[in-house]
Image (tube, grey):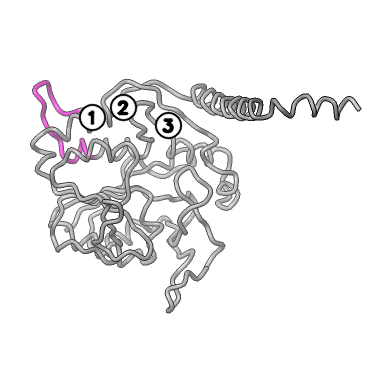
C-alpha cells in the first residue's frame, strides 16, 4: 500500500513536521489578521503614547456570536469593531481608550513649555495631572500604562469571591457596589465598558458619587445600541446570590466571545439615570449613530 508506506516513511519525521506545520499555521493566521488590519488601518497621532503610529482596525475582533445576539447590521458591526480596535501599534490603546484620553486632556488641561499637553504620556508628568486623585476600575487598555505614573492613582479589579479592599497578586479587589474607599476621596473616576457588568447599576452609581469630591468627574464608556429606548436588566442576582436571567444571556469582554455576564443593557435614557444619581451628564463624541458607537460620558458630581 503506498499510503501505509508513506505513513511509515513520515512517522520518524513527525516530531519535526508537527511543530513546523503548527508554526506555519500560526504564521498564516497572524499574517491574515495583520494584513486585514493594515488594509483597514490608518496612521495618525496617538494622544495616549504621543507617537505617530498605525491604528489597526481588526474587523474579526467582534465575534459572530455577539453580532448575532445583538442583531447588528454590517454597518453597526463595523462601528463596534472600530470602537474596540483601531488600536495603536505602539501602546495598544483602542479607539475608546484614546477618546477617554482626549477627554482627560480636555477636562484637565496641563501646560508644557511648548503649549498644552497633547498626549497622556506627556500629561501624567505635569503638576496638574500629578495632583489628581484618580480611581481606575478595571484596566483600560493602553491608558493604564501611562496612568501608573500618577502618584495618587488607585487601580483595582473585581475578583469574584474576594473581599473588597484585599489584594490579589498585588492588585486591589474592588466591587463598584460596595467600595472600600472613603467618601470624597477622588477627583476622577475612570471606567471603560465596566458598568454593564455590575450587578446593581444604581448602587454602583451611588458609590461612584460617594467617593468623588464635589465637582469630581466620572469619565467612562458603556456599550449602547441605537434603537434601545430604555435601559433594562439582562440579568440580576436572586436572593441566594445566583445569577438569574431576565433576557437572553449575553457574555462579553472586549474582543472576546466568552467573558463576564452582562447585567445591564443601556438605552437612550442613560442621561436621566445619571442625573437621578446626582451627576451632570454630558455625552461626548456623540450622538450614538449606526456608524459610531464610541461615545464617552463625562459626568460631574453636583
Ligand atoms: Zn499609542
Residue highlighted by disc 2: 46
Q: Quadrant of the C terminus?
A: bottom left
Query: Does residue 96 appear to the left or right of 277 in the view shown?
Result: right
Numbered range of the magenta stretch? 104-117
Answer yes or no: do the residues labelled 2 and 1 have beta carbons within 8 Å? Answer: yes
Residue 120 vertical placement versus 199 (above, below): above
Ligand 1 under 8 Å from disc 2 Cβ? yes
Is residue 107 one of those drawn in magenta? yes
Residue highlighted by disc 3: 86
Residue highlighted by disc 1: 119
**Rendered residue at 55%/51% (across/down):** 70
**Rendered residue at 45%/69% (across/down):** 236
**Rendered residue at 26%/25% (across/down):** 50
Q: Earlier in the sequence, mark 2 or mark 1?
A: 2
Name the foreground residue: 32 vs 169: 169
Label 3 secondary element:
loop
**Rendered residue at 23%/55% (across/down):** 280
Residue 147 vertical placement versus 265 (above, below): above
Label 1 secondary element:
loop
Ligand 1 under 8 Å from disc 1 Cβ? yes
Amino acid at each position: 500500500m503506498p499510503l501505509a508506506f508513506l505513513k511509515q516513511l513520515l512517522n520518524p519525521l513527525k516530531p519535526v513536521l508537527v511543530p513546523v506545520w503548527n508554526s506555519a499555521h500560526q504564521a498564516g493566521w497572524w499574517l491574515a489578521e495583520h494584513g486585514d488590519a493594515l488594509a483597514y488601518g490608518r496612521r495618525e497621532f496617538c494622544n495616549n503614547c504621543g507617537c505617530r503610529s498605525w491604528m489597526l482596525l481588526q474587523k474579526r475582533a467582534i465575534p459572530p456570536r455577539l453580532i448575532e445576539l445583538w442583531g447588528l447590521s454590517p454597518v453597526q458591526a463595523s462601528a463596534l469593531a472600530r470602537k474596540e480596535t483601531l488600536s495603536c501599534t505602539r501602546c495598544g490603546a483602542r479607539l475608546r481608550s484614546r477618546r477617554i484620553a482626549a477627554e482627560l486632556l480636555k477636562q484637565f488641561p496641563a501646560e508644557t513649555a511648548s503649549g498644552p499637553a497633547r498626549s497622556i504620556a506627556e500629561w501624567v508628568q505635569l503638576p496638574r495631572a500629578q495632583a489628581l486623585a484618580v480611581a481606575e476600575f478595571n484596566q483600560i487598555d493602553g491608558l493604564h500604562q501611562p496612568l501608573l505614573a500618577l502618584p495618587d492613582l488607585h487601580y483595582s479589579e473585581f475578583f469574584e469571591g474576594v473581599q473588597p479592599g484585599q489584594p490579589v497578586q498585588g492588585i486591589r479587589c474592588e466591587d463598584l457596589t460596595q467600595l472600600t474607599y472613603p467618601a470624597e476621596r477622588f477627583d476622577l473616576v475612570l471606567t471603560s465598558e465596566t458598568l454593564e457588568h455590575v450587578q446593581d447599576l444604581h448602587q454602583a452609581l451611588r458609590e461612584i458619587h460617594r467617593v468623588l469630591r464635589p465637582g469630581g468627574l466620572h469619565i467612562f464608556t458603556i456599550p449602547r445600541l441605537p434603537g434601545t429606548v430604555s435601559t433594562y436588566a439582562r440579568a440580576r442576582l436572586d436572593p441566594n446570590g445566583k445569577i438569574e436571567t431576565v433576557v437572553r444571556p449575553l457574555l462579553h469582554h472586549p474582543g472576546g466571545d466568552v467573558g463576564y455576564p452582562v447585567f445591564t443593557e443601556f438605552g437612550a435614557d442613560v442621561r436621566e439615570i445619571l442625573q437621578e444619581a446626582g451627576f451632570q451628564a454630558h455625552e461626548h463624541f456623540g450622538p450614538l449613530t449606526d456608524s459610531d458607537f464610541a461615545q464617552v460620558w463625562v459626568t460631574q458630581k453636583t
